[in-house]
Amino acid sequence: MEACSGRPPAGEGPESQLCGGSDGPVPREELTPAGMSQGKQPDGRERNGKKSVVSSSGDFSDPIYKEIAVTNGHINRMSKEELRAKLSEFKLETRGVKDVLKKRLKNYYKKEKLTQQRVDGDAGSYYDYICVIDFEATCEEGNPAEFTHEIIEFPVVLLNAHTLEIEDTFQQYVRPEINAQLSDFCISLTGITQDMVDQADTFPQVLQNVVDWMRLKELGTKYKYSILTDGSWDMSKFLNTQCRVSGLRYPSFAKKWINIRKSYGNFYKVPRNQTKLTIMLEKLGMSYDGRPHSGLDDSKNIARIAVHMLRDGCELRVNEKMHGGQLTSVSSSSPVEGAPAPQMPHFRN
């Protein structure tokens, strides 16, 4: 949700911690790592489906890090055509702007070198699943400050963090209670009609349906998972406001999440004003698929960005949380924990 949401433009909001590995100084020699296994798939997995093991931390005095640094320097001097040729040789994605291609090649080489050295850790797989959520909410043209935004679409896209495939989706519309009549602007922007919300359940019932769906997926019990959003406002503003409107306590399973804008900006070293959804897709060599401002379509496109980032070596992890009712950044040095098993929050007294 963007234009009608009252979200700040990309580039505002708390700064995030760095995500992913570092680009140190870099071989004129062939980039193919010595002894690279021909039994691995292009994404670094063994043919039996097991993901290769890589570290995001360790003893940086090890000579392997000097090799990686030398390689990075060589990659920095490559032209866009050379980068694409090398990526194609490794059967990697060749779409994207030059900086993205460089980052992709550096992380592929780093992953292969660290795998050979059997350094502990696992790049990109802090979680078994990522739940991508992008709400749509009531809105009016000009976004007046006094307007109360109510969630009118609750989508969830379930992304398997190991296979990098979308396994399932959830979508339900929500009947607003304060501004029960949608504005013409809101209908035009989101494609959500008055009939859709009139026939929908109110938020507490929809949230219960979401909780039931997530529990059927065994999230937080059998599988470790995290929520991922496009910016801070889905959780810190929309869900927070909606829970107050509905008289609910804020759900514990949604108190921490991955803000993909922060992760993208830090990983690809781009300014925050270049982390809008359509810009991120463009820089990664993709175009928007579906209807903009459909919550489900937005969530699917955000998931596509997450997949590219994981393939490029980004370690997506929680970087924001709600604490004492306020939005707070989560340090990259904090222990990585999965979200708790979903439970329906109690009503406020």
Image (spheres, rainbow, N blue to C red):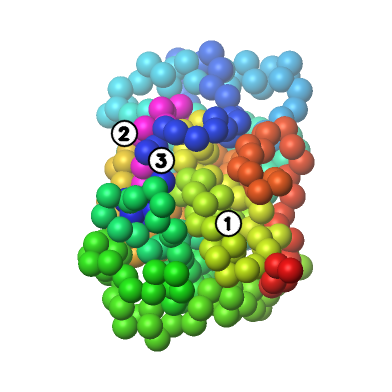
Mark sitting on residue 8: 3
Does the image show residue 176? yes
Amino acid type of disc 3? Answer: Pro
Q: Residue at x 34, y 65 (%)?
A: 294
Mark sitting on residue 97: 2
Q: Residue at x 73, y 16 (%)?
A: 61
User: In the rendered image of this protein, does residue 205 appear above or below residue 257?
Assistant: below
Q: Are marks 3 and 2 in contact (CB under 8 Å)?
A: no
Image spot of residue 151 (x, y percent): 46, 66
User: Pointer 2: residues within 10 angstroms few (<14), some, or many (20+)?
Assistant: few
Please name the residue that numbered disc 1 is placed on.
240
Q: Residue furthest front?
A: 146
User: In the rendered image of this protein, does residue 95 appear above or below residue 99?
Assistant: below
User: Pointer 3: residues within 10 angstroms few (<14), some, or many (20+)?
Assistant: few
Secondary element at tag 1: helix
Q: Is residue 276 magenta?
A: yes
Find the magenta span and give its range: 268-277
Q: CA distance from mark 3 to mark 2?
A: 26 Å
Left or right relative to 201: residue 325: right
Secondary element at tag 2: loop
Between 80 and 239, the residue placed more toward the observer is 239
Q: Residue at x 59, y 64 (%)?
A: 243
Secondary element at tag 3: loop
Q: Residue at x 30, y 22 (%)?
A: 79
Amino acid type of disc 2? Answer: Val
User: In the rendered image of this protein, does residue 114 appear above or below residue 64?
Assistant: below
